[in-house]
Every structure is written in structure tokens, then in C-alpha cells.
């Protein structure tokens, strides 16, 4: 991976003093993760280019270093050895640490002044829309240009690669440029090669505390810097004193004007329906992370509650959310959680007054619905079933959903109102239930609800 | 004195303290059969006399008793059991476990007991207390039979106690020592004519007025001999002597039971065609009526035959009831599994116990008429509604062959027409595949799959797998050959040859390894065959699925189009006739790889190639600029020209890597762009070809499939003798040519599909991948010496063990499907392969 910085002006060789790297020598630095080569492809009074070439060992990346005992983090076939990533940030910090802290014994004045600089980042991965590069760098005073590439010119149908060659031009202090690159490279890539611990908050404050604070896209920058740890983003904001009392910029659209997300409305509607039927035992099949269960758990009238999901990771989250292990430890047997599938007959689904299937049926292949129907309505035979599923006709209201696509990549189908009605009638006919169909969520101007709900009674 | 008790029962010792219960039990029963209250007191409190822990001790004792009985182990409860309440607990436990109870009452003279008590140094109790126990004993022991004890024995003296001898009797239903062969005949319902015809067809002949089989076969009637039909007495006249002479067995049906009650003058509602039977009986003399009554009384609810491998019962039997006896089991055998509700036609709503049946014994029953014999999970319902104008059917055992005769006419109008049999109630149960699995296979005795693996696979199979009815096989993973000792190679065919040589194989097949995606093809000759044999009724006649059981093609037309083309070849070349089959299962590879691996190419392979090429080019030109400036390497601590050379090598490597994956990518616009290469003909009706040679497989595929349609590709191969250096050199040369021109490599297989060395299964195949291809696995630069030396430290043992286990499961699932085992038995193996795949094994192997 390669990064170059070009200084244009007079006596541009002086950049060597700031970088503490002699323009007439090439140097190499051995680091834990690989080797950094520092050299100058171009040196003249008017124009000097400094290059940092970072060489990573692909086998060490994949296997973990032979002597370290650590497991590898990456596949053998991996872009990391070639792209400008968090490895480069680390290399900057260790090879150009003095320059980053704006300290220079010989040219402090130059270090403190704005210079005409041009940075060129080869193969920078950009997650999502590449326009964020402008959002990130333009407010910091750079002229941004970038070159994009197809994944493979032989197969144009594979589309555009995530990488750009990015050029930043600006009249800025060298230290600012380096610090901004240190932060914004992983913000673009949204990946780090190391375990992100709480120290990372402090580190971000060191390298970006000041300029992030006044950056118009600071929320996006902080969020992307901590893609997996939202709490760190919040702590960072607190640390640098933004977003605390109401003047924050972290306004998710959901928080505006009391708008309630559909998910919440849906779960509350289902809960109300359960309470209305006075069910003493309820099973939530496809319980996911246990949101509905946590609502139902609050109602002491429900003596027996169970959640089943086919996904182990979802069940783990549900266990945490519901404090399942503590409940068990205290001898509370009101709630049971278990792995179950609607395509396998399961005696653990039996003997419930009410079964809830919230946004579940659309995840089952249509060809396999008959088995699902048997398992639920033929064998488990709950007294009542509350089942919700998207209303496909409503999708027109979502900008991000194309004409023929579905709301979620794992949805195997979505039903129109007529299709849902026909299916519920088939269930009633075949398994001796009656049904009532309702809409959930705010209606659009055609009177269409986003979610449809069927309440079946035996 | 002889004490006769069933070989499986619950025995209660009854008697006051010092009456010799423990001594008696200890003398006549095995130590592990005896649960003594003293021992349990000791267990919970270190003191067998501590009366304060009695409640806890008994709780534990009954828990153990229950577990023992559930495992069908005779159990003796050694406690005083003086109070009625105590004994009630015992009879209730027996009832819940469907087991007979025995009371052995120690009724010794009071004097003897008091003397004994006084003489017990360790734990004599006050005489007053013994006397009060004795009075309780006298009050309670008179009515033990009424309390529910089936067998009651009184031991009156010490001599009797010493001389007593326990004789075990078999349960009435235990006919395990009868091995047949049997002809099990469905509900006759007075259809004497059809019965005679059927017996004739089965080869029975009349000898001295009784039907018997010259080869010693035995008929077994599943009951409901009478009612509704025209000649009830004739049927009884035929069957009763057969049973009496030992030529037949008979279990009672609900109609037989009702008739018996009628003959015993019990209050019976006369309906359901009982009327015509009664009318016929009215014309018979008392002796015959008596004979019928005795016959009916002698019938036993169900029989266990042939060492427990066959069970016959009128209305079927739950797995846990087999080999037990109780009123509730008798009821079940007569009437089946009913909810007690009736449907809109007034017929009882039946639960289908057979759907849940997972036992290995074959269960044959009647009771519910269907148009055809219904087979489900090792159970056969052979009531084919003769009296309703259907058929009278027989299941021959052990042949499992069905013989039927058509009813002459409809003798009795059914409430609803006979339903056609749809064997689609073979619902899989979560309990079939969750938790730790132990799967017995013919190649590896027991394969144990930990519950973490089954949980992971449970999710995968539920979310992504195709209809399990189609999934009769999943291919195993394949290990590479041992790591090559040669400098420039990670893998080389020489290692494969030496592996097989070491394992006693002399001939091997080298097959070109197609670089596509593994696919299993299941194809039926017609949608009807798919419905009949696979229970798939959506009108399709086959499937193509991946090695994880997912449908291969998203586009159903692509799938059916490819199936049609394979079928066209098979049909044209008389495959269906030659193999006398309506379905076939093939192991294949489908090209191009890019068709299935698009996501991988777009997200990993392509981008790495792009980033590598751009970054290396940019780096090279940056280094070159330094040279252009005129700085010589001598001025620096870095050898820039070495660095430049190294980066040029890297660029060269990445270009080769891109070329390597390009080989396996092409656009697919229509079916014409797809290639399929079958290489195993796995199975067809009645036959699994896992024991044939690979030469045979390739030969059959050549003969029936490849060569005409360009979409169906041949698999180039070379069969060599590995002891012949010339031949191995030729094979290695061939491998070099293949891999240098971009092929993935080759697969080396022993001559025979399944090969053992000293009783141990050896690898059914090992792969030798090409040098260029491996760039896609180990990275573009893996061949540089400093990388290669590290990569050579790899261990194959996990991969190889996994390959063997998966292979055994694959062969086993085919074997089970071919021998028509139930779906859950086939699915278990297929699921097992998926579950094993979640084991952490180096994915690059």
C-alpha cells in the first residue's frame, strides 16, 4: 500500500525536516505488522514528493505470526496487503509521529504554517457511496478528486470496485493532513485490523478532537470510526463535549416529532392483541432478539411464556435482553427459550393458548409453506395464532425499495392483501380456524397499512 | 412353592419389620433389581434407620423405580408397604408404566416375627410398634387383587420362604421366538370369498379341513374378522381352526371385542354392521357360540414376533407400549389413537401415532381403511377396505411384499369413499436431529455429532435447504493429497499415489477435477414417479442441489431445462429400461464456477485482483521514479533495486492470479452456457452403486449421458497401475499439462468406490490441485519460497477424518433411501453431513 505527499512551493525539500526523513535517502522501518519503506520519488526546489510504502506479509495476516500464537485475522486471498487501510494509519503514527504532533527542531515555523500539499492515497476502500469522500475532506479545506475502477474489466457486469485512488489538494498544515488521514482512512474503510478497545476513544480525541468538533459531518465520522461499538461513539462525543445537552447533531430521524418506528407499533399491537384474548400461555415463534417477549414478560397474567427461534445468535441476544440466565438462576420458570424451526414438528410448540409469529412467515420458502402450516396449525394447534407479515402493496411508499424487490434480503416473498387473505382462508378451511385480518402501522393516502395481521382462532 | 411372575413386572414386598422381606428379595432377585427403603434412607442421610428422612428416601426410590420401568427393567420395592396409600403409589406407578404388578406378602406367624425382632442386635424396634404394624398388616392384605395387584403370593412360613422358587413367565404378547415367515392379513369383515381367494394366492392349501401353508408360513390376522360383510360365520369357521392348529395367529379388532361382549350378554350398542353378524350367529348352535366366545376371549391385544423385529396389532401401537401390558394398551390396540372427538361425518378424529413412530420394529396393523397399503416410518396399514369394495391385502414378512385380491363388490357403503394413500405425513421432528446425534452407518460403526454442530446445522437446514424429501445424499468433503516435498509444489500427484500404495491399492483412477460447483442431481422419469417415490407433489420431477442441500439454480426454468436435457439422453439411450428404475441420483460438477460463486468473485476474488494490480503498479512507478532521480542504491540503507524486482514479481503473481480465476468465469445467458459433468451414478431404484468401480461409473455415464449434448460434459480420466513407474509418470505429466493450461487439478481415487485397508476405510478420493489454481486459495504470492516453506506446515488429519465420516454418511443415506427406509432415517444422515461441515477445519484444504 502506497501513500505519497507532495509539497509544492519554494525550498520544498524542507518537508524532509518536518517529516524527519532525509530526501536523499531511502529508509526502512521494521514493524510488528510488516515493513515500511520511506523514500522520495521526486525532489526539487519547487516540488518534493514523499512516499510511504507499507509491505504486509500476507501469510502472517492469514495465519497469525508464527511466533505470536495469535490466530490469523484474514483470508489468504485478501485485499489488505494492497489497500490503504488502518495499517497505514498505524504506520503514519509510528514512522511520522513527530510530524503529526507538529514538532520540528529545525523548521517549527514551517510546521506551524499552511503549505500547498497534495496527498495521494492508492487503493483506498470506500464503504458505501463514494461521495462521502467529499463530505469528509472538503469541509477540511481540500480539493477532492478520485479515480474509480471496475472490479474486473473482463467482467463489467460485476460492477465498480470499492477502491479509489484519492487525491487531496489543499493549503493546510502538514500535521493536520497527517492527523486527518490517520482518522479518515478507517472512516472510509470502516474496518480496523486490531481489536478496538476503549483506548481508541482517547486516540481519536488526540488525532481529531479539535477538527472533528467543528466538522459538519462529525456524526457520520464518529459513527463510522466506531462501526461496531456505538457506546464508544457516544463516549467520544461526551469526551469532546458535543451532543450532550440537546444541542447534539446525532438526531436520528426516528427521534423527530414523535414518529414511532413501525417495529414498535407492530410489537405493541401484537402485545395488545395477546392481552385482549387473556391468554395464559404464549409462545413467540421466530422470537428473534426477544423484543415482543420483553413486552409480554411485563404482564404477570401470562403464566407461561416461551420464545423459539431457529437462529442461535438471535437466541443469545434474546437471552441477554431478557436476563434469561438470571431468571433461571432465581428459579423463575415462567419463560423458556429454545431453538426451534417451523419446518420440523416439535412437541415443544404444543399446549399454548396463543402463538405469535411476528414477521416470520415471509422468511420461509413458499414451496415449504405446507410443512410450516402442518407444524403450526396441524400439530402444535394453539388456541389462537397472531401472525403478521408485510403488505407488499405498501412498498411503493418506501423510496429505497425498487419496484419488484422486497423489504429484506431474506424475505422469500411478500404478500398483497388479496394473497394474504387467500392464504388465511386456506388455513381456516384446512385446519378449522376462523380469522380476523387487521392492518398495522400508519396508513398511506390509499388507506394501505404497511403490515398486515391475521388473528386466527380455533 | 413356585411363584410365577411375568418376566417384566413391578414387585412389591409386603410385610412388617423383621418378617424377612429383604432376606427373601435378596435371595430371589438380583441386587440391582431391589430398591430397598433402608438403602435409600442410607443414601440420603448416612443412616438406614433414620425415620425422619423417610419422605425424601421414598421420593428418590420412586424416581429410580420409574426410570427402571421405563427401560423395561423388572423392579422390586423392598419396603413394608403396609398402608393402602403406600401400595396405591405402587399400583399407580405400574399403571403409568403399563407393567403388571406382583405382591409378595411375608405372612409369617407373629411369634416368629417377634422372636426375630427381639434377636436383632443392630436395630430391634419396640414390640409395641411391631404389634401395631401387624394389625395394619392384617387389615390391609386381604384385598390386594382389588387394589390392582395382578399376582399375589403369600409366604406363610420360614420354610416356604426358603423353598420358594421364582418362575418367570413370558408376557402373552411375547412371541419373539416365532420367526415366521408370516403372511399378515388385513381386516376381513366377513368377506370369506375374498379371504379364500387370498389364501389360495398366497399358496395355502386345505388339509384336513384347515388351511395351511406347505412351506410352513404362518398367517397372522390383524383382527376385525366379522361385521358388515356377507359371511361372518364362514370366516370364523376358517380362521378359528387355523389359529387352533397353530397355522395362524390372530389379534383382536374392535369389532371382535364388541362381538365378545355381546356374546357375554354385555350391553352393546348394535350398529356398524354388528347386526348381520348377530343374525348369522342366531342360526348357530350353542356349542359354536361357545367356541366363538372362547376364541375371542383368548385373543391377545398385540404380538411381538421375530425377536422383536415385527409387531402386529389391530389399530397399531405406540412405540413405548410395545412389550408391555395394561388395559390402556389393550384399548389402544383395539381402537387406536383417538382424541375422543368425532368429525363432521361422525367418525372418530384419529391422531396418527405412526407419524411419531421412530422404532426399528416393523409394525403391521389394520383398522383404518385406505385405498392402498399405507407405509409410514416402518409401519404398514394393511386394511384396504375389502368390505367397502376395496381389496383384501396381505403383507408378506420378511419379504415386505404386498399381495391383494379385489373385493367382488361393495358389501357395505363406507361413510366416505376410501382415501387414496398419500405418504406425505412423514413429517420430520425437531427431536430427530437436535442434541447430540449418534448415527450408525455401514462403513463406520457410529458417528457421533456434538450438539453444537447439530444446532448450527438445524439453522442452516431450516433456512436454506430444499425440501428434505429430495435430499437423499450430500457429497463429502475431499482432502488434498499430502503436502509435497518438492520445492516448487504444495501439492503433487506423487503424494496421492504413495498414499494409496501405502494403503494397499494398486490401481487408481485419475479424474480431471472440474472447476465448477458440486451439484447433486435427482431426476425422476415423471412427476408421478416423483410423487410416488419421493413424496414430492408439486409437479416437479427432480432437483439439482448444492453440497449444502440448497437448490442450485435460483431460476426454476434453468433447473427444469437442465433436467430435461439429462432426461432426454437417458430416455434416448434406454437408461430407464436398462436400469428398471423411475429415478436416478447423480453426483456432478456444474460449470462455470462464476455462476454459483458470483458473490465470492465480486466481493473477494475480483477486488483483490483489482487492488493488487493497481497498488503494485503505483508502487513500482514510485520506486522507479527514485531511480530516475539518479539515486543509486548505494546511497541508501534500502536495496531499492531488490525492492523493485520484488514488486515486479508481485505484480507478475497478481496477474497470474487474475488469469487463474478468469479460467473459471464466463457469462451465462442461457442454458447453452452451462456445463454439467456427471461423475458418479449414485443410485437408482433398489440399487446403490457405491460398491462399483469408478471405471464402471465413468463407463455408465459415457454410455447413457455424455457425448451428444454439449451441455453434458465428460470427465477426462486415466486409469493407472501405481506400481508401474511409467504409468505414474504419464499421469503426472497429464496433471502438469492440465494444470498449466488453467485446469484446477485432478482427483485420484482408488479403483473401487469404497475401499478398506485392514478393515479401515481409506480416503475415497484425494485431490491434487495445480500450482496456478492454488493462488486462489493461498494467495497470489504463495509460491515465493519464504511463503511456501511456511504454508507447507499444514496438517491434514482433521480434514481426512471429516472426509471419511461424511463419506460414510453419504453412502448410508443412499443405502437407507434405496432400501425404502423412512424419511427421518435418510434425513438423519444428510443432516449429519451438514452438521459435520460446521466443524472448524482449515477451509483451504
Image (tube, coloured by chain):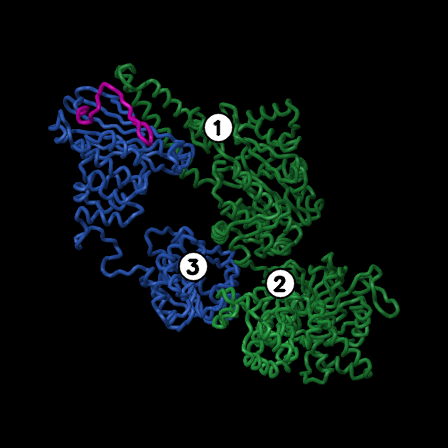
Quick check: do tags 2 and 3 share a chain? no
What's drawn in magenta, residue-wise? Answer: A15-36
Residue located 41% across and 38% down the image: B602
| Chain in blue colour | A
- Mark 3 and mark 1: span between their CA atoms? 46 Å
Q: Which residue is mark 1?
A: B772
Q: In the image, B396: left or right of A163?
A: right
Decide which of B712, B788 is in the foreground and name it.
B788
Q: In the image, A68: left or right of B212?
A: left
Q: Compared with residue A111, is residue B116 higher up or lower down, i.e. above or below?
A: below
Secondary structure under the numbered disc 3 in the rendered image: loop
Count of numbered labels shown in the rendering:
3
Disc number placed over residue A286 in the picture, else none: 3
Secondary structure under the numbered disc 1 in the rendered image: loop
Please tell me in which quadrant of the rendered image residue A456 appears.
bottom left
Please tell me in which quadrant of the rendered image residue B230 appears.
bottom right
Image x and y of residue B516, in percent: 52, 37
Q: Residues within 10 Å of mark 1 (few under 14, many from 20)?
A: many
Q: Is residue B91 visible?
A: no
Q: Residues within 10 Å of mark 2 (few under 14, many from 20)?
A: few
| Chain in green colour | B
Amino acid at each position: 500500500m502506497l501513500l505519497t505527499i507532495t509539497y509544492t512551493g519554494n525550498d520544498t525539500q524542507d518537508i524532509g525536516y518536518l517529516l524527519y526523513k532525509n530526501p536523499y535517502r531511502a529508509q526502512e522501518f521494521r514493524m510488528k505488522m510488516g515493513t515500511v519503506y520511506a523514500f522520495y520519488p521526486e525532489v526539487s526546489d519547487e516540488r518534493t514528493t514523499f512516499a510511504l510504502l507499507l509491505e504486509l506479509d500476507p501469510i502472517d495476516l492469514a495465519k497469525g505470526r508464527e511466533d505470536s500464537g495469535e490466530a490469523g485475522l484474514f483470508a489468504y486471498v485478501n485485499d489488505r496487503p494492497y489497500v490503504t487501510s488502518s495499517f497505514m494509519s498505524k504506520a503514519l503514527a509510528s514512522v511520522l509521529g513527530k510530524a503529526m504532533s507538529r514538532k520540528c527542531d529545525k523548521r517549527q515555523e514551517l510546521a506551524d504554517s499552511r503549505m500547498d500539499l497534495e496527498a495521494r492515497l492508492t487503493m483506498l476502500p470506500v464503504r458505501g457511496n463514494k461521495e462521502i469522500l467529499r463530505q469528509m475532506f472538503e469541509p477540511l479545506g481540500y480539493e477532492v478528486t478520485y479515480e474509480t475502477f471496475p472490479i474486473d474489466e473482463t467482467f463489467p457486469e460485476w460492477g465498480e470496485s470499492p477502491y479509489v485512488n484519492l487525491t487531496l489538494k489543499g493549503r493546510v498544515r502538514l500535521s493536520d493532513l497527517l492527523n486527518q488521514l490517520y482518522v479518515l482512512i478507517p472512516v472510509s474503510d470502516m474496518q480496523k485490523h486490531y481489536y478496538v478497545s476503549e483506548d481508541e476513544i482517547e486516540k481519536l480525541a488526540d488525532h481529531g478532537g479539535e477538527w472533528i468538533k467543528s466538522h459538519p459531518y462529525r456524526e457520520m465520522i464518529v459513527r463510522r470510526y466506531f462501526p461496531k461499538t456505538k457506546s464508544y461513539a457516544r463516549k467520544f462525543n461526551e469526551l469532546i463535549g458535543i451532543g450532550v445537552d440537546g444541542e447534539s447533531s446525532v438526531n436520528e430521524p426516528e427521534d423527530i416529532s414523535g414518529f414511532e418506528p413501525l417495529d414498535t407499533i407492530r410489537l405493541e399491537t401484537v402485545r395488545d392483541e395477546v392481552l385482549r384474548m387473556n391468554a395464559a400461555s404464549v409462545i413467540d415463534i421466530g422470537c428473534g432478539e426477544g423484543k415482543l417477549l420483553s413486552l409480554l414478560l411485563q404482564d404477570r397474567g401470562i403464566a407461561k411464556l416461551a420464545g423459539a427461534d431457529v437462529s442461535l445468535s438471535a437466541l443469545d441476544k434474546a437471552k441477554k435482553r431478557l436476563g434469561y440466565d438470571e431468571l433461571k438462576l432465581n428459579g423463575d420458570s415462567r419463560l423458556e427459550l429454545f431453538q426451534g424451526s417451523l419446518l420440523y414438528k416439535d412437541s415443544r410448540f404444543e399446549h399454548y393458548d396463543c402463538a405469535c409469529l411476528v414477521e416470520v412467515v415471509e422468511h420461509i420458502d413458499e414451496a415449504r409453506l405446507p410443512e410450516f402450516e402442518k407444524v403450526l396449525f396441524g400439530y402444535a394447534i394453539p388456541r389462537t395464532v397472531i401472525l403478521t407479515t408485510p403488505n407488499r402493496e405498501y412498498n411503493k411508499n418506501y423510496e429505497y425499495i425498487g419496484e419488484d424487490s422486497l423489504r429484506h434480503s431474506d424475505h422469500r416473498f411478500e404478500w398483497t392483501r388479496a394473497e394474504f387473505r387467500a392464504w388465511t382462508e386456506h388455513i381456516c378451511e384446512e385446519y378449522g380456524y376462523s380469522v380476523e385480518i387487521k392492518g398495522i402501522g400508519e396508513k398511506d393516502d390509499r388507506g394501505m397499512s404497511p403490515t398486515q395481521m391475521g388473528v386466527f382462532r380455533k | 412353592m413356585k411363584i410365577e411372575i411375568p418376566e417384566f413386572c413391578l414387585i412389591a414386598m409386603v410385610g412388617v419389620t423383621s418378617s424377612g422381606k429383604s432376606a427373601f428379595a435378596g435371595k430371589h432377585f438380583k441386587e440391582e433389581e431391589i430398591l430397598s427403603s433402608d438403602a435409600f434412607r442410607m443414601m440420603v442421610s448416612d443412616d438406614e434407620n433414620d425415620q425422619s428422612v423417610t419422605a425424601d428416601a421414598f421420593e428418590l426410590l420412586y424416581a429410580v423405580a420409574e426410570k427402571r420401568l421405563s427401560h423395561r427393567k423388572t423392579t422390586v420395592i423392598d419396603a413394608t408397604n403396609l398402608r393402602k396409600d403406600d401400595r396405591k403409589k405402587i399400583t399407580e406407578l405400574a399403571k403409568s408404566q403399563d407393567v403388571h404388578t406382583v405382591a409378595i406378602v411375608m405372612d409369617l406367624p407373629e411369634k416368629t416375627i417377634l422372636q426375630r425382632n427381639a434377636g436383632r442386635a443392630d436395630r430391634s424396634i419396640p414390640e409395641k410398634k411391631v404389634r401395631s404394624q401387624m394389625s395394619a398388616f392384617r387389615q390391609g392384605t386381604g384385598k390386594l387383587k382389588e387394589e390392582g395387584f395382578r399376582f399375589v403370593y403369600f409366604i406363610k412360613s420360614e420354610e416356604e420362604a426358603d423353598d420358594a422358587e421364582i418362575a418367570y413367565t413370558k408376557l402373552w404378547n411375547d412371541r419373539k421366538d416365532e420367526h415366521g415367515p408370516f403372511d399378515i392379513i388385513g381386516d376381513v369383515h366377513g368377506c370369506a370369498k375374498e379371504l379364500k381367494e387370498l389364501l389360495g394366492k398366497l399358496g395355502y392349501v386345505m388339509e384336513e379341513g384347515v388351511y395351511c401353508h406347505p412351506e410352513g408360513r404362518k398367517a397372522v390376522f390383524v383382527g376385525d374378522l366379522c361385521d358388515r360383510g356377507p359371511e361372518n360365520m364362514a370366516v370364523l369357521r376358517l380362521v378359528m381352526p387355523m389359529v387352533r392348529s397353530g397355522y395362524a395367529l390372530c389379534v383382536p379388532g374392535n369389532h371382535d371385542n364388541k362381538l365378545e361382549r355381546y356374546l357375554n350378554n354385555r350391553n352393546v350398542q348394535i350398529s356398524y354392521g354388528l347386526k348381520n353378524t348377530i343374525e348369522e350367529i342366531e342360526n348357530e348352535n350353542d356349542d359354536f357360540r361357545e367356541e366363538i366366545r372362547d376364541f375371542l376371549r383368548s385373543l391377545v391385544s398385540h404380538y411381538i414376533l421375530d425377536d422383536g423385529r415385527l409387531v402386529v396389532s389391530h389399530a397399531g401401537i405406540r412405540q413405548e407400549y410395545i412389550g408391555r401390558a395394561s388395559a390402556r394398551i389393550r384399548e389402544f390396540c383395539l381402537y387406536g389413537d383417538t382424541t375422543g372427538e368425532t368429525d363432521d361425518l361422525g367418525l372418530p378424529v384419529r391422531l396418527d401415532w405412526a407419524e411419531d413412530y421412530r422404532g426399528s420394529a416393523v409394525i403391521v396393523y389394520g383398522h383404518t381403511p385406505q385405498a392402498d397399503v399405507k407405509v409410514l416410518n416402518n409401519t404398514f396399514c394393511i386394511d384396504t377396505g375389502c368390505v367397502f369394495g376395496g381389496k383384501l391385502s396381505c403383507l408378506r414378512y420378511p419379504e415386505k411384499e404386498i399381495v391383494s385380491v379385489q373385493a367382488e363388490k361393495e358389501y357395505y357403503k363406507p361413510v366416505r369413499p376410501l382415501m387414496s394413500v398419500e405418504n406425505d405425513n412423514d413429517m420430520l421432528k425437531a427431536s430427530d436431529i437436535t442434541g447430540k446425534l449418534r448415527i450408525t452407518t455401514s462403513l463406520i460403526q457410529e458417528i457421533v455429532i456434538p450438539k453444537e454442530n447439530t444446532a448450527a446445522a438445524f439453522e442452516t437446514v431450516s433456512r436454506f435447504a430444499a425440501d428434505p424429501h429430495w435430499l437423499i445424499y450430500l457429497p463429502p468433503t475431499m482432502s488434498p493429497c499430502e503436502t509435497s516435498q518438492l520445492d516448487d509444489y504444495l501439492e503433487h500427484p506423487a503424494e496421492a499415489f504413495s498414499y494409496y500404495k501405502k494403503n494397499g491399492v494398486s490401481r487408481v483412477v485419475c479424474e480431471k477435477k472440474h472447476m465448477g460447483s458440486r451439484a447433486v442431481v435427482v431426476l425422476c422419469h415423471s412427476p408421478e414417479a416423483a410423487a410416488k417415490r419421493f413424496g414430492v407433489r408439486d409437479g416437479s420431477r427432480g432437483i439439482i442441489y448444492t453440497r449444502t442441500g440448497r437448490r442450485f439454480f435460483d431460476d426454476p426454468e434453468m433447473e427444469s431445462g437442465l433436467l430435461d436435457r439429462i432426461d432426454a439422453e437417458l430416455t434416448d439411450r434406454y437408461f430407464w429400461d436398462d436400469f428398471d428404475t423411475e429415478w436416478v441420483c447423480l453426483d456432478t460438477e456444474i460449470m462455470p464456477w462464476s455462476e454459483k460463486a458470483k458473490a465470492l468473485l465480486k466481493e473477494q476474488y475480483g477486488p483483490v485482483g483489482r487492488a493488487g494490480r493497481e497498488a503494485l503498479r503505483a508502487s513500482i512507478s514510485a520506486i522507479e521514479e527514485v531511480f530516475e532521480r539518479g539515486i543509486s542504491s548505494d546511497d541508501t540503507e534500502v536495496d531499492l533495486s531488490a525492492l523493485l524486482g520484488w514488486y515486479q514479481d508481485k505484480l507478475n503473481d497478481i496477474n497470474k492470479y487474475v488469469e487463474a480465476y478468469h479460467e473459471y468465469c464466463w457469462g451465462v445467458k442461457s442454458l447453452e452456457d452451462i456445463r454439467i459433468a456427471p461423475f458418479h451414478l449414485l443410485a437408482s431404484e433398489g440399487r446403490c452403486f457405491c460398491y462399483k468401480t469408478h471405471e464402471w461409473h465413468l463407463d455408465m455415464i459415457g454410455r447413457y449421458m455424455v457425448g451428444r449434448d454439449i451441455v453434458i460434459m465428460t470427465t477426462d480420466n486415466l486409469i493407472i497401475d501405481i506400481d508401474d513407474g511409467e504409468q505414474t509418470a504419464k499421469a503426472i505429466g497429464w496433471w502438469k499439462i492440465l494444470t498449466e493450461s488453467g485446469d484446477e487439478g485432478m482427483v485420484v481415487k482408488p479403483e473401487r468406490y469404497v475401499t478398506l485397508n485392514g478393515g479401515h476405510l481409506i480416503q475415497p478420493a484425494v485431490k491434487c490441485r495445480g500450482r496456478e489454481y492454488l493462488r486462489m486459495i493461498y494467495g497470489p504470492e504463495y509460491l515465493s519460497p519464504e511463503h511456501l516453506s511456511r504454508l507447507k506446515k499444514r496438517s491434514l488429519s482433521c480434514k481426512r477424518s471429516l472426509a471419511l465420516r461424511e463419506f460414510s454418511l453419504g453412502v448410508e443415506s443412499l443405502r437407507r433411501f434405496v432400501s425404502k427406509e423412512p424419511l427421518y432415517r435418510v434425513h438423519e444422515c444428510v443432516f449429519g453431513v451438514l452438521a459435520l461441515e460446521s466443524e472448524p477445519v482449515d477451509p483451504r484444504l
